């Protein structure tokens, strides 16, 4: 009898052999999904097209947690970037709403993404303080370098010292000990505001140390929450999260983020899964693991779509409505707008792919209009949302340009600047952009207003431009003399994009050079753009005009072309036409028109190489002829 009882007790004390991991990443403040906001009805089902929404996400989490806990522990995790991307984030420092909602939903661990620091470290600290009033989810961040000498880092040091942020975390459920680490990737670190003093430790080596420490504490399962990303490489997968899993064999699972990848099935590295659930609360990942000896294997995986087949939790909807009222009161009312105010409409879906131009043209046209510049420029990575058919509310338009923070103030949105450049600097910037996106990724693909760039992709890098035309509002054009240092062209853009111009020389290893000027021909530093900020008010001093405000104003000012009382966003003609024009040709006139020393040098090198090859072949043929004779 005693032996049987002992067997039962030992069995009951054994850790469970199954665990379910529910996971999200990159909420991006999409508390009511991906829009259009006017169509979102979480209190009913079967009547709206919206994907995502935290109220619906909460309902599905509750159901799966109840069902899956019957066979083993259930964990709810997130891979970072909980904030930034919608009007809700404009009050995150005052409300901490995203983190508070994560606490309500019962997250067991979350990590930090790059966008958590978009309001700089002071703003991050304010967000944490606001959320703490009601409660924070456990935050794990293992590879942030706290040893650097910067006064703002004291905020982070105190949060670690107070246990608000943990370098590692161990959770015990039903006898199962799960160890968590959280990492921020190099690519994510690179796209932070340049004055944010967050730097990361080497990803693989620092994570290996953390994982070894967790293993030493006797955990059964090691999960790394990673804001690093994956990317498609041929028929397989690459990226920092794949490199991390390959480099640290002690990791059992990576719950990823940053690349916004909706993985329909896990990426397996030696049987160990990497999972990621898209972005904007549109999906919930469910990973079921079963113990297999000393390791774990994937038993089942499902990527659940959050759509209007799911009723939203009413208490969560009420909380989000409270945040919306805060946005109206604090942010929009002083500007004469409301969160749900209709300011325009589109007739069809417009995306952000290389072959889709309406959104990029709209944003840059708005910048050029607001700044009064000759041209405007931005990158595809700053375009944050598609436009969906139907009415566009202020909240929908904000999503398109929903990042950044001020230079002189600390309110949401990138400030607009008006720069001056000479001909050679304009050419250098454009030449780098033509190459940069092929190296750094699609986020760097350029979007223009007020100019057309004609280039030959078969010319050598950094000397591909054949001609640049200025295009005026009346449709007239003129060719820019890119070789003349006395040429002056004004550019309207954001501080985020402008900060890139002066470092073109560094990025191109000295092959290109660009400088930006103010209205008095003074050279500007990347660290001081205050003299070229666009003033958005008649109030004394410079009141920064933000990119999102310029876009809302521009959309609201479009004509009502269909007579329904709502402005129509331009969707045809020049508004939908490419402004970066590839004209591939090997014709000498196309290859050498406006060519610089780079093209001539490359041609000479190729010609000499061809001559050497021809001589070698000729000599070989002669030798072969002599032998055969």
Image (tube, helix red, strand yellow):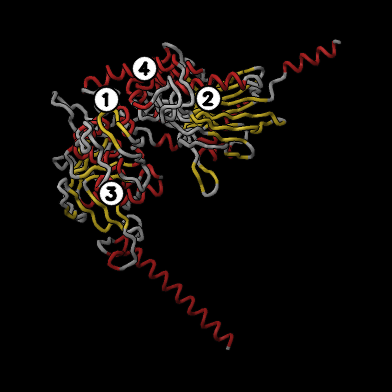
Horizontally, is 214 left or right of 603 in the view? Answer: right
Residue where numbered disc 4 is placed: 321
Q: What percent of the width, then of the height, locates residue 230?
A: 50, 39
- Marks 4,1: beta carbons within 8 A: no
Closer to the eye: label 1 or 3 = 1
Residue where numbered disc 2 is placed: 77
> Within 10 Å of the Cα at label 3, are there few (<14), some (14-19), or many (20+) other Cα atoms?
some
Q: Earlier in the sequence, mark 4 or mark 2?
A: 2
Q: Is residue 223 above or below residue 155?
A: below
- Marks 3,2: beta carbons within 8 A: no
Residue sitting at x 54%, y 39%: 242
Q: Is residue 514 above or below residue 398?
A: below
Considering the numbered disc 3 on the image, is that residue within a helix, a strand or a loop? Answer: loop
Mark-to-mark CA distance, 4 and 2? 25 Å
Q: Which mark is residue 341?
A: 1
Mark-to-mark CA distance, 3 and 2? 43 Å
Closer to the eye: label 1 or 2 = 1
Horizontally, is 370 left or right of 311 in the view? Answer: left
> Within 10 Å of the Cα at label 2, are there few (<14), some (14-19), or many (20+) other Cα atoms?
many
Residue where numbered disc 3 is placed: 577
């Amino acid at each position: 009898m005693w032996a049987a009882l002992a067997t039962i007790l030992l069995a009951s004390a054994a850790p469970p052999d199954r665990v379910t991991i529910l996971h999200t990443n990159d909420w991006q403040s999409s508390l009511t999904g991906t829009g259009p906001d006017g169509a979102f009805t979480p209190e009913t089902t079967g009547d709206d097209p919206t994907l995502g929404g935290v109220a619906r996400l909460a309902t599905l989490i509750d159901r799966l947690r109840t069902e899956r806990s019957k066979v083993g522990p259930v964990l709810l995790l997130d891979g970072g970037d909980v904030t930034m991307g919608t009007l809700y984030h404009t009050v995150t420092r005052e409300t901490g709403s995203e983190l508070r909602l994560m606490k309500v939903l019962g997250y067991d661990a979350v990590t930090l993404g790059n966008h958590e620091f978009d309001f700089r470290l002071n703003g991050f600290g304010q967000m944490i303080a606001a959320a703490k009033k009601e409660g924070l989810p456990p935050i794990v961040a293992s590879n942030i370098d706290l040893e650097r000498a910067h006064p703002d880092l004291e905020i982070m040091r105190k949060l670690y010292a107070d246990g608000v942020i943990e370098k590692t975390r161990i959770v015990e459920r039903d006898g199962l000990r799960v160890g968590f680490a959280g990492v921020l990737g190099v690519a994510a670190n690179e796209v932070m505001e340049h004055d944010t003093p967050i730097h990361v430790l080497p990803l693989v080596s620092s994570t290996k140390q953390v994982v070894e420490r967790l293993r030493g504490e006797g955990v059964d399962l090691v999960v790394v929450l990673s804001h690093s990303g994956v990317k498609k490489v041929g028929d397989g997968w690459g990226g920092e999260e794949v490199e991390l899993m390959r480099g640290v064999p002690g990791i059992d699972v990576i719950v990823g983020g940053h690349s916004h990848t909706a993985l329909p099935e896990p990426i397996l590295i030696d049987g160990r899964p990497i999972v990621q659930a898209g972005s904007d609360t549109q999906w919930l990942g469910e990973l079921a693991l079963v113990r297999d000896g000393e390791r774990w294997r994937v038993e089942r995986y499902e990527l659940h779509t959050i759509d209007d087949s799911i009723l939203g939790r009413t208490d969560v909807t009420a909380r989000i409505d409270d945040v919306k009222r805060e946005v109206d009161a604090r942010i929009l009312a002083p500007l004469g707008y409301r969160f749900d105010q209709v300011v325009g409409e589109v007739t069809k879906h417009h995306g952000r792919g290389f072959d889709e131009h309406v959104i990029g043209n709209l944003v840059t046209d708005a910048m050029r209009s607001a700044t009064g510049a000759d041209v405007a420029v931005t990158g595809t990575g700053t375009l944050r949302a598609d436009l969906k058919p139907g009415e566009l509310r202020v909240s929908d338009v904000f999503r398109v340009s929903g990042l950044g923070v001020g230079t002189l103030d600390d309110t949401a949105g990138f400030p607009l600047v008006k720069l001056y450049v000479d001909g050679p600097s304009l050419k250098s910037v454009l030449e780098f952009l033509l190459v940069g996106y092929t190296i750094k990724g699609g986020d760097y693909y350029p979007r223009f207003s007020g100019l057309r760039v004609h280039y030959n992709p078969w010319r050598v890098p950094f000397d591909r431009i054949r001609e640049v035309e200025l295009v005026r509002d009346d449709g007239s054009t003129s060719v820019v003399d890119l070789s003349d240092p006395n040429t002056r062209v004004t550019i309207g853009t954001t501080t985020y994009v402008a900060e890139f111009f002066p470092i073109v020389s560094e990025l191109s290893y000295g092959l290109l050079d660009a400088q930006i000027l103010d209205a008095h021909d003074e050279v500007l530093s990347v660290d001081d753009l205050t003299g070229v900020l666009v003033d958005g008010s008649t109030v004394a001093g410079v009141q920064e005009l933000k990119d999102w405000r310029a876009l809302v104003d521009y959309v609201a000012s479009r004509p009502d072309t269909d007579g329904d009382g709502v402005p129509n966003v331009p969707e045809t003609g020049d508004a939908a036409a490419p402004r970066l024009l590839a004209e591939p040709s090997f014709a000498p006139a196309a290859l050498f028109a406006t060519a610089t020393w780079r093209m001539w040098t490359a041609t000479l090198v190729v010609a000499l190489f061809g001559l050497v090859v021809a001589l070698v072949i000729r000599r070989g043929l002669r030798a072969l002829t002599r032998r055969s004779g």
